[in-house]
Structure formats: structure tokens, C-alpha cells
């Protein structure tokens, strides 16, 4: 069983719409949650980190965490074609290593 | 955010040669760095955890004698792919861990090194 699961996509949304990316994890002891964006041929770039239940907003991005449901999501408002990339969910417990999902490919069409 | 650099960004070598990749934390000290490998259209695969001043911890299935890791200072870790073969061709990415005290820690990634073994 995968430790961090994401739908591989592609998730297609029109420009200006809200993109919703979801991630579930199996380790209930997980304490730190991250969203990375990876453009094709490039390395991952940290977008958001979240540690407590609820929402955390940063510009057009909102991360949502529900530890009871073992679920973390990323909302991208006013999606732009430049947001087209693969979004990696990563989860960590304490000072253990990051565990990555396989990523969701997002396509934003003009 | 913290800046991590890698060098070289791209390398092409002949089969049987060794290739060294450097990973540097530019504006912070990193006691822990990580080395990942990524094949096309696949997710990141952690190869090893590199701790300054001690031996690296390798993930299951990763040959420590083939992928030599040295973390000699708080800002530099190196990965040497020894006797490289075509199947070692991949995108190698390092990351460095930044501690935020009570707020936990975050990993920042270098830009990656694309290795092609002919």
C-alpha cells in the first residue's frame, strides 16, 4: 500500500478556474505536509507547507489539512497556464525522511 | 527560501567512467542533505540521506559502492556515480534540510543534474 497517494491526472482546468489537488496519506503520526511544484525537466519547488488542521493561504494557493481523515489538498485559484506542472504532495513524521506521492499533473488551458 | 545549487547541471559521459555531482547550500548550513533520482515520468526516488561528518544512509536497493556520497562540510555534499552505465542515466536531484527550530524543518531542492551515459 502506498504511503502517500495522489491521482496521477492529468487534471485539466480552464484558465481562471479553481484547481483542486488532493492527497491522502497512511501514517497517522505524520506531522508535516508539503506541496511541491515540478515543471517538466526541472526539480521540485516548494509551494506550501502546512502543519495544523485547517486552511493556510498564500496568494492564489490554499493548503487544507484534515488529520482525522488523513487528507491534504491544494487549491489554486485563478489558475494560469503557467501553473501547468506536476504537483507533488509530501508528508513527514518528526525528523524522518519526506515521503512523496507520485504527483498530479495539472493542465491549465488558455 | 533557502537556495541550493548543483553542479554540473548536465553531464554526458562514456560507459565505465565516474561522474561527481556537487550539491551546495548557498545561504545556510545543512547538516542533512538528500539525494534523489528521477526517471522520466516517474516520481522522485530517495537514494540516500547524507549527514555532515558521518556515513550516508542508503535506501534499500541502492548500491553504496556504486553511488558514493561524501558530506564533508555543512554546505557541500557530493554524489559520485562510479563506473557509470547507460541504465544510470537519470535526473539526479539533491535537497538540503533547513531547521526552523520549534517549527520543524523543510527541504529545499537543487536544480538537478541530468546524467546521460553513452
Image (cartoon, rainbow, N blue to C red):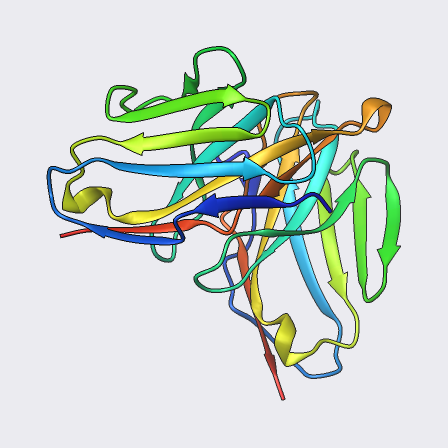
Asked if residue A20 lies left or right of residue B95, the reply is right
Residue sitting nearer the eye, B92 or B73: B73
Please report the residue visible at 12 percent of the width from the left and 47 percent of the height from the top.
B14
| Residue B19 as seen in the image, left or right of residue A65 | left
What residue is rendered at 56% in x and 66% in y?
A85
Please tell me which residue is depicted at 47% across the width and 29% down the height of the picture: B77
- Looking at the picture, tell me which residue is in the foreground, A72 or A90: A90
Q: Residue at x 71, y 39 (%)?
A: A33
In this picture, residue A49 sits left or right of residue A9 = right
Between residues B28 and B62, which one lies in front from this camera angle?
A: B28
> Which percent across, then down, holds residue B73?
54, 21
Spot the residue most to the bottom.
A110
Residue B114 pos. (x, y %): 35, 52
Q: Answer yes or no: is residue A52 visible.
A: yes
Q: Is residue A23 above or below residue B76?
A: below
Farthest residue toward the top? Answer: B54
Quarter of the view holding residue A50: top right
Is residue A13 visible in the rendered image? The answer is no
Relative to B104, does residue A19 appear above or below in the rendering?
below
- The spot of residue A20 in percent (x, y) is 71, 63
Give the image location of residue A30, x and y in percent. 70, 27
- The tally of labels here is 0
Amino acid at each position: 500500500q502506498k504511503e502517500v497517494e495522489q491521482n496521477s491526472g492529468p487534471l485539466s482546468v480552464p484558465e481562471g478556474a479553481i484547481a483542486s489537488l488532493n492527497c491522502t496519506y497512511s501514517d497517522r503520526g505524520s506531522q508535516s505536509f508539503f506541496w511541491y511544484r515540478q515543471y517538466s525537466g526541472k526539480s521540485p519547488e516548494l509551494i506550501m507547507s502546512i502543519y495544523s488542521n485547517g486552511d493556510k493561504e498564500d496568494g492564489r494557493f490554499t493548503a487544507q489539512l484534515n488529520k482525522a481523515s488523513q487528507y491534504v489538498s491544494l487549491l489554486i485559484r485563478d489558475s494560469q497556464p503557467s501553473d501547468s506542472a506536476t504537483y507533488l504532495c509530501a508528508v513527514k513524521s518528526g525528523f524522518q525522511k519526506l515521503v512523496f506521492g507520485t504527483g498530479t499533473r495539472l493542465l491549465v488551458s488558455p | 527560501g533557502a537556495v541550493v545549487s548543483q553542479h554540473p547541471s548536465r553531464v554526458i559521459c562514456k560507459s565505465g567512467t565516474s561522474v561527481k555531482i556537487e550539491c551546495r547550500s548557498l545561504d545556510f548550513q545543512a547538516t542533512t542533505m538528500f539525494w534523489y533520482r528521477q526517471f522520466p515520468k516517474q516520481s522522485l526516488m530517495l537514494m540516500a540521506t547524507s549527514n555532515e561528518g558521518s556515513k550516508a544512509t542508503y535506501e534499500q536497493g541502492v548500491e553504496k559502492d556504486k553511488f558514493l556520497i561524501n558530506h564533508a562540510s555543512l554546505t557541500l555534499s557530493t554524489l559520485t556515480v562510479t563506473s557509470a552505465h547507460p541504465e544510470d542515466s537519470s535526473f539526479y536531484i539533491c535537497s538540503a534540510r533547513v531547521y526552523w527550530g520549534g517549527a520543524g524543518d523543510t527541504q529545499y531542492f537543487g536544480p538537478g543534474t541530468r546524467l546521460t551515459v553513452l
